[in-house]
Image: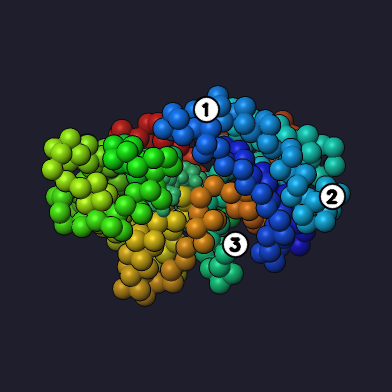
Amino acid sequence: MGVVLGIESSCDETAAALVDGHRTILAQHIASQDDAHRPYGGVVPEIAARAHVERVMPLVAATLVDAGMTLADVAAVAVTAGPGLIGGVMVGLVSAKALALAADKPLMAINHLEGHALSARLADPALEFPYLLLLVSGGHCQILVVSGVGRYRRLATTIDDALGEAFDKTAKILGLGFPGGPAVEAAAARGDPRAVPLPRPLLGSAEPHFSFAGLKSAVLRAKQAGSHADEDIAAAFQAAAIDCVIDRTRRALVAAGAVGALVVAGGVAANRAMRTALQALAAERGLRFSAPPAALCTDNAAMIAWAGVERLGTGQNDPLDFAPRPRWPLDPSAEVVRGAGIKA
Ligand code: KG4
Ligand code: ZN
């Protein structure tokens, strides 16, 4: 099967990659914009869009050069067409359309969440459908049954913050810097999780949904109290978050029906303590456990190219007038959960 060029620009990473049907990442480049957004403590959409404009075509060119290929050698151009920050999505999508048109190649408009959802199959050739997917990133926090390419049933979502958002806000409260997830993980490793009592929102509730707003507020109160070490607060936050994730995933496994594997993907899946806890849950339930390497968990273009490879196998592609979709749920039939109106 042919080689797919993937392009990602939906948040603050500009990335390009070439992936083939044998799961080989022939070349890839990622330009992070952390330095540009750090002064603001979060991603500024207008700054992100402008940075994508400057970077996307040079990254595509460098990726092709690294692989010793030209556009004529690719089978298709796959690009994130949503959900995400509209400016960045438009930059990537317009660039991909121009490349596809110029080289007369099919365009694949990929849902960013589908990229995360299928990324585990890029890293793990033995991972078969159906699997239970915990998708945890900066913008999303969902549990889905993945039964095939394009076949997603959402069992749970967050009623307020996404898990990555909670990590980022905790980092901000503790003054640990940006991006927050890795900083909280590093601080947590030095702290005592029992030193600070924190709530576990929705623990034990019947529906497997998530809530992290109350936990975030409790972190703020613990910090304001002034009597706890930052490392202890970070450790207590991470332990509470993991307890919630395990409880909610356990609940979702009951609702999921037969699945062969438990998969975690998205930026927060890079968290080692979370991976270890999920691996233990999978072992307890007799399930295969699969998590992509950290570099494939955070935003990248290899997962977009791979989703394109998977879609190529099903013979699907998209028209050149495909419109960007800032909101694009993986499971459009999923009920809207109270408080979750702004999450895709
Ligand atoms: O998938 P991703 O790169 O972008 C989105 O699609 O949102 O996820 C980014 C999120 C951020 O919230 C970041 O803080 C979090 O993933 N993250 C982590 C870790 N590495 C990244 N959270 C916890 N522990 C980590 N090691
Ligand atoms: Zn992402």
The residue sitting at 67% across, 43% down in the picture is 7
The percent position of residue 220, horizontal first and vertical second, equals 22, 37
Q: Name the spot of residue 156 as percent of width and height, x first.
A: 35, 48
Q: Tell me if residue 303 comes above or below residue 107 in the rendering.
A: below
Front position in the image: 245 or 208: 245
Q: Which mark lies nearer to you, 3 or 2?
A: 2
User: Which comes sooner in the sequence, label 3 or label 2?
Assistant: 2
Residue identifier under label 1: 45
Which element carries disc 2, helix, strand or loop?
A: loop
Q: Residue 233: where, in percent of width, then height?
A: 22, 48
272 on left or right of 87: left
Residue projecting furthest to the top:
46
Q: State the CA–CA distance, disc 2 to disc 1.
A: 32 Å
N-terminal-most mark, 1 or 3: 1
**Residue 311 in view in this figure:** no
Left or right of 263? Residue 13 is right
> Does mark 3's beta carbon lie closer than 8 Å to ligand 2?
no
Q: Amino acid at mark 3?
A: Leu
Is the CB of mark 1 within 8 Å of ligand 1? no
The quadrant in which residue 92 appears is: top right
Q: Which residue is mark 2?
A: 70
Q: Which quarter of the rendering shows the C terminus?
A: top left
Q: SS class of the residue under badge 3? A: helix
Q: Which mark is residue 122?
A: 3
Amino acid found under the numbered disc labelled 2: Thr
Q: Earlier in the sequence, mark 2 or mark 1?
A: 1
- Horizontal side, residue 124 vs residue 251: left or right: right
